[in-house]
Image (tube, rainbow, N blue to C red):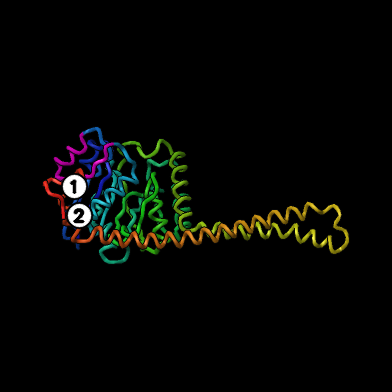
Amino acid sequence: MRVFIQIPCLNEEQTLPLVLKKMPKTIPGVDDVQLLIIDDGCTDETVQVARSLGVHHFVHHAKPMGLARAFRDGVDYALKHGADIVVNTDGDNQYPSETIGDLVQPILRHEADIVVGDRQTATIKEFSWFKRRMQAFGSWVVNLAAGTHIPDAASGFRAYSKNSLLKLNIVTEFSYCMETIIQAGNKRIAITSYAIRTNPKTRESRLFHNIFEHMAKSGGAIIRSFLMFKANVIFKWAAIIFGVLGLIPFVRYLFYFFSGSSSGHLQSMLAGVALIMLSAFCVALQIISEVLRIQRKLVEDELERTKELMYCHENQQIWARQNEWGGYDDASPAQ
C-alpha cells in the first residue's frame, strides 16, 4: 500500500517548510509514504527548499497552469509510480499535515474512495460573515447537484483511492474541487468527509483575487459539471413547464372557440402554440442530450480501461525510468 502526498506549489519557499514539518513519514496500514511537489511555474526557491527537506518526486510546469492542471498532472505522476492512495494538500500550510494519517483511514477501511477534509468554515476566524455564508451556500449547491452530503465542497485537503482516480476525469481549468464531488456523486463513488482544524492564515489566495471572482468561477465550474450528467433533466423540466404554460392559453382559446365567442382571443391561440412548440423543441433537445449522455458514459468506461492498462504494474516499471522532466536518462528507449 503506497500513499503519495502531492503538494501543488507556486512560489511557496516560505511556507513549504511549515507544511513538511509535521508531514507523517509513516501511516498505520500503509507500507510506503512518498511526497510529490508540483512545481506550477515557481520562480523562487521552492524546488530547492523541497529537495533540501528530502522530497524526491517532482512535476514541473514551465509556467503557471492553474490548480486543476497541477492536480491532474500530480495524479498522473503518482499513479505512474504505484500510488494506491493520493492525498492532496496545499503549499500555504492552510491544512494540518499531521492529520493526513487520519484522513486516509476511511479508504484503508474500504468505507470510502474519496475523503474531503471539512475545514468547519463557520469556525474560521479569517473568514468574514459573508464568506462563511457563501461557502455554506456553495457547498449546498454542489451537494444538490451531486446528491452528496459534503459540508465543505471547496476544501482542497483530500484523499483519493486509485479506484476513484481511474473513474474521475478533470476537464475544468479553474479548480477540481467542485467537479470531482459532482462526478463522484453521479458516478456512485463512495465519498465522505473528515473534520479538521485549519492552521493560521499565511497569505492571500492566489487562485482568485476576491470572493466574487471565486463565486463566479466556481459557479461556472458547477454548472458545467452538472450539465455533463443532468442536461437531460433540465430539458425535461423545461419541456414540462413550457408545455403546461402553453396549454393554459390554448385551452382558453378553445373554450371561447367552441362557445362561439372566439373573436378577439387569437392572441391566446398564438401564445399557446408558440409555447407548445418551444416545449416540443425542449423534448428534442432532451432526446439529443440523453444520447450524448450515453455516449459520454461509454467513452468514460473505455477511458477507465485505458487508464488501468496505462498504470498497471508492468508499465510502472517504464514510468520509473523517467526523470523528473519526463525524459529518460538512459540512451535506449524503454521497451
Q: Is the residue marked by circle 1 packed among few (<14), some (14-19), or many (20+) residues within 10 Å? A: many
Pointers 1 and 2 in contact (C-beta within 8 Å): yes
Please say whether residue 36 is one of the residues in the magenta stretch. Answer: no
Q: Magenta segment, which residues?
A: 45-62
Residue type indicated by callout 2: His
Disc tally is: 2
Q: Name the residue carrying label 2.
A: 81
Q: Quadrant of residue 11?
A: top left
Question: In terms of depth relative to the viewer, which is nearer, 32 or 106?
Answer: 32
Question: In terms of depth relative to the viewer, which is nearer, 158 or 245?
Answer: 245
Name the mark nearer the viewer: 1 or 2: 2
Give how far across and how far down residue 152 sits, in percent. Answer: 39, 52
Question: In terms of depth relative to the viewer, which is nearer, 191 or 126?
Answer: 191
Please say whether residue 51 is one of the residues in the magenta stretch. Answer: yes
Give how far across and how far down residue 143 sits, in percent. Answer: 45, 56
Q: Name the residue carrying label 1.
A: 57
Inspect this view and state whether residue 229 appears: yes
Going from N to C along the chain, the mark reached first, 1 or 2, is 1
Q: In the shown orientation, is residue 127 left or right of residue 83? A: right
Give how far across and how far down residue 188 sits, in percent. Answer: 39, 64
Residue type indicated by callout 1: His
Q: Quadrant of the C terminus?
A: bottom left
